[in-house]
Amino acid sequence: MAVRGFDQTARHGVDNALLQAVHLDTVLLGSIAVLVVLGLVVLYSAGGADSTLMLRQGVRLGVGVLVLLVLAQISADSLRQWSPWCYALGLTLLVWVMLAGVIGKGAQRWLDLGVLRFQPSEMMKLAVPMMVAWYFSEKHLPPTPRQLLTAVVMVMLPAGLVAEQPDLGTALLVACAGLFVIFLAGISWRVILALVAFAVACTPVLWHFMHDYQRQRVLTLLDPESDPLGTGYHIIQSKIAIGSGGLYGKGWLNGTQSQLDFLPERSTDFIFAVFGEEFGFLGGVALLILYVAIVMRGLYIAARAQDTYSRLLAGSLSLSFFVYFFVNIGMVSGVLPVVGVPLPLVSYGGTSVVTLMAAFGILMSIHSHRRLLTR
Amino acid sequence: MTNGEALKNPYLEKRLFANRAWVAAGVIVTLMFVSLGRLAYLQIIHHNHFATLSKDNRVRLVAVPPPRGLIYDRNGVLLAENLPSYQLEIIPSQVTDMDVTLARLGELIALDEGDIKRFRIELRRKQSFQSIPLRFNLTDVEVARFAVNRHRFPGVDINARLGRHYPLGQRGVHALGYVGRINARELSRLDGNNYNGTNHIGKLGVERYYEDILHGQVGFQHVEINAQGRVLRVLDEQSPVPGKDLVLSLDAHLQQVAEESLGASTGAVVVMEPATGEVLALVSMPTYDPNLFVNGISVRDYKALRDHSEQPLFNRALTGQYPPGSTIKPFVALAGLEYGATWAEKKMWAGGYYTLPNSSHRYRDWKRGGHGEVDMMKAITQSCDVYFYDLSHKVGIDHLHEFLARFGLGRRTGLDATGEAAGLLPSREWKQRAYGQVWFPGETVIAGIGQGYMLTTPVQLAAATATMAMHGTKVRPRLLHALRDQESGAFTPASIALEEPVRLSDPLYWDQVVQAMIDVVHKGNGTARRIGKDAPYVIAGKTGTAQVFGLKQDERYDEETLDKKLRDHALFVAFAPAHAPQIAVAVVVENGGHGGSAAAPIARQVMDYYLLGKT
């Protein structure tokens, strides 16, 4: 098997001993902590200076942290062995949801497990990159066209099922997570270019199969004024909120757009508009830097991982995180369609918090279990 | 992974990954700058534009509710209209101290406890920026008094809204229904967008059944408001699409005639046009004023209606279920003919009672001594019970059930109003399901005279009579005559809903039974001869008397000594002119006694008005 570079470990030095013992990464943990606190502060404001939402989100974050801690203790090797099972389970649940899911918000996404309701599509955000990374982990990289095709099918099958639900936003994220693994596995640029060209050519076909509300979102994006009473209202109001924030912002709890209820969905998908209004351009710069720092740290962890599986998975999870906030900020500021992607760790909502924390748990595990690898 | 070719090359893989990671990092940083560029564009370059939009002139989207469609009768008499009414509304988010505001408002405008209580309930339920009505129907004096003092009440304003009004008041309420304020349950099932700005929704009757058509499509205005929330000017507007007007098949005058001829009695009258199924009058007495319900009925008024001994809120015409009594006999006769259990001329001896073979139970006739020798004509004309005990026993419950179901008994007629009951057409399966018991032959016997389990609604009786009048052509009854577009004034007539017709093996059976029904009214021994004496047109009818109170085997029914509540219901079904039917009527007079004396004259008055135009 592969020979590992022990020299790198030695050169890296020793992190905080306690954190190391519980398999946590200081830099990542610190950035997440700052982001989470910032998120709760904004949520307090978005909830109308009321702590109800903030406290509820705090509980969810607590659950998320617990998941993070547990996953950080599991070695990447074990994760790798579980990957196909997780994927198979996720796929089964997706089919189940399709057949017997509870109708939630007019779309079948939820699985009612009695005590809790659960979105299998959320699980696929992790299971898909795990599966593809597992598939490539034993292969000779860069992959052959045949392996490539297999991997693409692995990604598109669950993504297609999620898109059918219909949940375009999550389908996009699931597909991205899988495609990032393929990208990182090292397919040639020529193939990538060909695929991009193909995707562009497919757009009219995709359009044909879109649901009406999805088409509406795309059309509204191109011309928000065309539907000021429906979807366009969100974008118009959030642009006013962000724009009126100016360089320094109106100050915490002083955003008139959000506090006077002009801004819809301000505690969930459009929370960035509250942030932009109250903390201004400088706040936005700080937030983006914080997000990018987390992504970069993730990529660094990936680059330093010792086996193909860990490397591909860590890389994909980091890039997915980037897509999360980039798409959200893009849609709230009116450059991307409103696809219903929350602002990671800031938007109000339970399932996405747990998924994100789980992803960070995996990153931490990959980072901290390096020395323990004995193979 | 055994040969060199397939062996993984960790060094190469790592370099490949690092290569890709660097590219990704580059893209990420680029996209971050794109995002920042967008933020700078919004927050720095166009900051003034957005700051103006947000700060100085707040643009608010205001819903413009569509005017609700009007309701007319078939002759253009207005049944439901929209009258402008002034109401006092408060936007809570703009009020600093609600208690003080309410107290001060109370000095200007009379507010009773109910107003404030309802307002407080809505205050808790609605979002703080939504306007909540406090008082309805302000007088001109009150409007003027508030206008002078308006500056003292930020967040309080008077709005002119269209309120529903029923100019005929109590008349036809059981068909028309009414609108009322939207409640929490309705709120959760409604399209919130389309009901933005609308406070009322159809609660009953036609108003509810045609809610979607009457409501229309909401419109919106972009308005400029100042810091106090007052509208400065309208920037642009998308007009609402008004709801469509309904032209009902009801004839308001006929309705009045029917209501007045029932007088103080409780009961129901349903009048239909047999060929089209159009309901000309739908009466349930006593009635009530729907205007009370529009803006929330007061507790006292509601209690008075609810606890009224004669239950005015109860829709007897649609929801009232009565044993059809002898009015079922013409249909049973048809079943007997169709299944070959008898023929019209076949005679039998009808004594004072009937007994089943091997049973001593006596099924008595209403005529103590019996009718003597009767054929089908005489049995219907004189409403001979024994004849029909015998006939239904011969037909059997299975055939009887199947045949009467063809006339629509035992299920909703599908009339376009709410609250219709299905009635009950008993069968073996039904009894097994409902009671877990087998069907007894004796139950078939009494079913033949419309007693026992059988229940019908007046609208079912009218529809079945119309089918009889049309010799089997069956039309679904309906209240809608046409839709009228408020803007263009164009009419869209409602279509006739033909249902599965009743086909008989020999059409002659229709003529025989109809002739017997004519004899009921026009022959000297007919049970409804009193209305046939001077009738200038030919009426076919059948009287009925439905028992409310069960008599023991040897008890006598004595009207005088019986409590009014326990007296028999009087029924009468009829159509006229018998050979070219234009009108079918079903009348139920609760505790009225005999169909011939209590119910038939009402039907006669209704038919006279409709056919002769006299009142």
Image: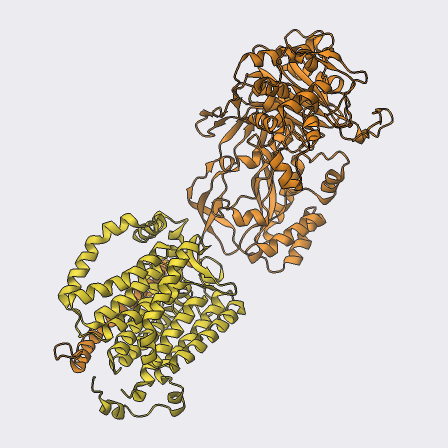
**x%, y% of residue A122?**
38, 65
The quarter of the image holding the N terminus of chain B is: bottom left
Q: Between residues A50 and A160, which one lies in front from this camera angle?
A: A160
**x%, y% of residue B600?**
71, 17
The quarter of the image holding the C terminus of chain B is: top right
Residue B46 can be seen, yes or no: no
Q: Quadrant of residue B172?
A: top right
Residue at x 58% of width, y 11% of height: B511
Point out the residue furthest to the front here.
B358
Residue A101 can be seen, yes or no: yes
Q: Colour of chain B?
A: orange
In this picture, residue B195 sits left or right of residue B308? left
Q: Is residue B317 above or below residue A227?
A: above
- The yellow one among the chains is A
**x%, y% of residue B117?**
68, 52
**x%, y% of residue B335?**
60, 21
Point out the residue furthest to the right here.
B561
Q: Between residues A263 and B461, which one lies in front from this camera angle?
A: B461
Q: Quadrant of residue B316?
A: top right
Q: Is residue B501 above or below residue A204?
A: above
